[in-house]
């Protein structure tokens, strides 16, 4: 017997668990998130939020709030460089300006905002939309059958246990994912890269920053390799150290944690700053840099999302952003199945669509780690870098719920300017005459977009909303001619299009396929 029933139980109430809860709420499905910790993140961790994430925040009405919060700590135009030390020579520029090359392809911009500042915003929105978040609560055991999942929850303060019955469970329980282990899902990839540390500190580095307005500053010198993220005033922030010592092929070089004392941490900090000045260590966190992907994203009624599904080094800022995309792909599908609008087989498309992209993300994070942190190790297993924008909003997905077109070339990423509205890609951004974007037409329903014109059928099947778009460049960007139509999912992915005139039956069949219903 269960003590409580919920449609969806989410294990983990951090970045990805909270995003999933918020999105389920957006789609009208209540959820219960359980989180061991007493609150949201205590460390900044993720800071670089990519377009895929900021477009979702915009959809959720959080864009301005997040941008305002971001500016309290970071500049909107910071870049990513490498230095010998803050006081020393500049070695490389990886990203000149955070949003260079973005304009015209997205209605929003990338931001730097610390995870411990973003999470409370997500949590508040999730709760506002009907989610329950229970802290100091651990998922202690899980059992599933054909009809649902029974999860034993332990109240970590009272020590009491209760059982919750859910139709589905999302395991957003982080890189060591106890759920993943229980389900027997293995990881594959590049393995452990280093036993890294993050030193949170206070020191007045403002003079050393000079006019360098940077979001991330890599440090590369014979003593250590890692990166700084500093607030805009240069007074607080953190230093990540991935490797120490000159010979990065040595095991001791990739183990920064063993034997670490406060004195040694201070000496690392002084070396990375490159000057002696008053400095105070606030905290030191140990973590493993890894680049691995789960072999599967689903076991029965349990789905892996976020770090539970893929663990990457922070270089390039992929980890949290990939997790947000997992949540965005999964949440509307879960909601549509729970509400009885989609066939449960739709849930199989989560793995079909996301796993190749998770593997790509792991590969690309590894490329950035290898080239920015340990270039001395050589490039035998390093794939060429894919431009960031292609990894953010240039994905190409395939699954039975996406009606790919004849002549599909099989690519999994391309520049958004080349996507051309093909099924499986994110709907292109086109500015509307009222100042909004075509992406703003994507709500909780499917959206049917057609070029406006005389006699164009302003109709959408139940479960979708019709929009006749009268905007320069729209038909070209979406690859439509007069009478053509495109069907956009609630996660802004194009499910189907008819370049030329399509009748109502065709559109209804496309929607049924996009919901996993047999036609
Ligand atoms: C130094 C650093 C910098 C980074 N920078 C970036 C960046 O710039 N951009 C980016 O996108 N990513 C970045 N990341 C990665 C990012 O922090 C992670 O990818 C992100 O936190 C993953 O979120 P998650 O919700 O999947 O997992 P987590 O944040 O690990 O959360 C999992 C949660 O599950 C809880 N939990 C686990 N088991 C249970 C259980 N049985 N019951 C209840 N609760 C449980 C845990 O307490 C935890 O709170 C960085 C990471 C580090 C370390």
Image: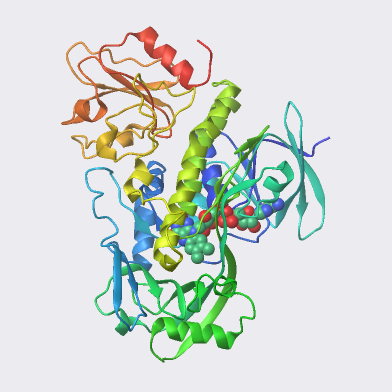
Describe residue 83's horizontal placement relative to residue 330 as left or right: left
Is residue 354 shown above or below 289? above
Which residue is drawn at the image coordinates 60% and 49% (left, top)?
Answer: 308
Is residue 333 shown above or below 244? above
Which image quarter: residue 488? top left
Choose between 498 and 191: the one closer to the eye: 191
Which residue is drawn at the image coordinates 27% and 37% (left, top)?
Answer: 429
Choose between 299 and 290: the one closer to the eye: 290
Residue 374: horizontal and vertical position, in percent? 44, 67
The image's colour scheme reads rainbow
Residue 18: horizontal and vertical position, in percent? 55, 49
Is residue 454 shown above or below 467? above
Residue 400 appears in the figure? yes
Is residue 275 shown above or below 96? below
Residue 45 appears in the figure? no
Choose between 215 and 192: the one closer to the eye: 192
Describe residue 159's horizontal placement relative to residue 224 as left or right: right
Choose between 300 and 91: the one closer to the eye: 91
């Amino acid at each position: 017997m269960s003590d409580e029933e919920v449609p969806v139980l989410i294990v983990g109430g951090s970045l990805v668990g909270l995003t999933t809860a918020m999105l389920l709420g957006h789609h009208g499905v209540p959820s219960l998130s359980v989180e061991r910790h007493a609150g949201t993140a205590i460390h900044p961790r993720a800071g670089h939020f990519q377009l895929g994430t900021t477009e979702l925040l915009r959809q959720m009405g959080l864009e301005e709030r997040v941008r305002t919060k971001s500016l309290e700590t970071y500049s909107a135009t910071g870049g990513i460089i490498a230095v010998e030390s803050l006081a020393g020579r500049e070695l490389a520029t990886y990203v000149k300006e955070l949003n260079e090359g973005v304009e015209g392809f997205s209605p929003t911009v990338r931001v730097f905002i610390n995870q411990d500042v973003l999470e409370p915003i997500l949590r508040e929105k999730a709760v506002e939309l009907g989610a329950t978040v229970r802290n100091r609560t651990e998922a202690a055991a899980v059992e599933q059958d054909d009809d649902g999942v029974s999860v034993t929850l332990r109240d970590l303060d009272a020590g009491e246990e209760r059982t919750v019955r859910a139709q589905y469970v999302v395991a957003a329980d982080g890189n060591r994912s106890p759920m993943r282990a229980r389900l027997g899902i293995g990881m594959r990839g590049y393995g452990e890269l280093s036993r890294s540390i993050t030193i949170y500190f206070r020191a007045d580095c403002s003079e050393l920053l000079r006019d360098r307005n940077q979001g991330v500053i890599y440090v590369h010198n014979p003593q250590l390799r890692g990166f700084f993220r500093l607030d805009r005033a240069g007074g607080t922030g953190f230093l990540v150290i991935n490797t120490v010592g000159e010979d990065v092929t040595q095991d001791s070089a990739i183990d920064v944690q063993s034997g670490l004392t406060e004195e040694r941490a201070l000496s690392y900090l002084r070396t990375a700053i490159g000057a002696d000045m008053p400095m105070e260590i606030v905290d030191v966190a140990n973590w493993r840099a890894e680049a691995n992907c789960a072999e599967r994203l689903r076991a029965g009624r349990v789905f892996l999302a976020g770090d539970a599904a893929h663990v990457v080094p922070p270089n390039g800022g992929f980890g949290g952003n990939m997790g947000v995309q997992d949540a965005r792909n999964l949440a509307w599908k879960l909601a549509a199945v729970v509400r009885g609008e989609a066939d449960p087989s739709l849930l199989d498309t989560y793995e079909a669509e996301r796993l190749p992209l998770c593997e790509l993300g792991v590969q690309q994070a590894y490329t950035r780690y290898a080239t920015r942190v340990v270039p001395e190790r050589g490039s035998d297993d390093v794939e060429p870098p894919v431009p960031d924008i292609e990894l953010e909003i240039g994905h190409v997905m395939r699954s039975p719920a996406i009606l790919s077109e004849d002549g599909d070339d099989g690519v999994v990423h391309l520049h958004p300017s080349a996507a051309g509205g093909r099924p499986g890609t994110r709907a292109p951004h086109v500015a509307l005459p009222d100042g909004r974007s075509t992406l703003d037409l994507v709500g909780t329903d499917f959206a049917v977009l057609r070029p406006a014109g005389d006699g164009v059928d302003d109709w959408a099947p139940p479960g979708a909303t019709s929009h006749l778009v009268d905007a320069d460049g729209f038909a070209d960007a979406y690859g439509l001619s007069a009478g053509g139509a495109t069907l956009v999912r609630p996660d802004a992915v194009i499910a189907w299009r008819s370049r030329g005139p399509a009748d109502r039956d065709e559109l209804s069949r496309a929607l049924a396929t996009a919901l996993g219903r047999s036609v």
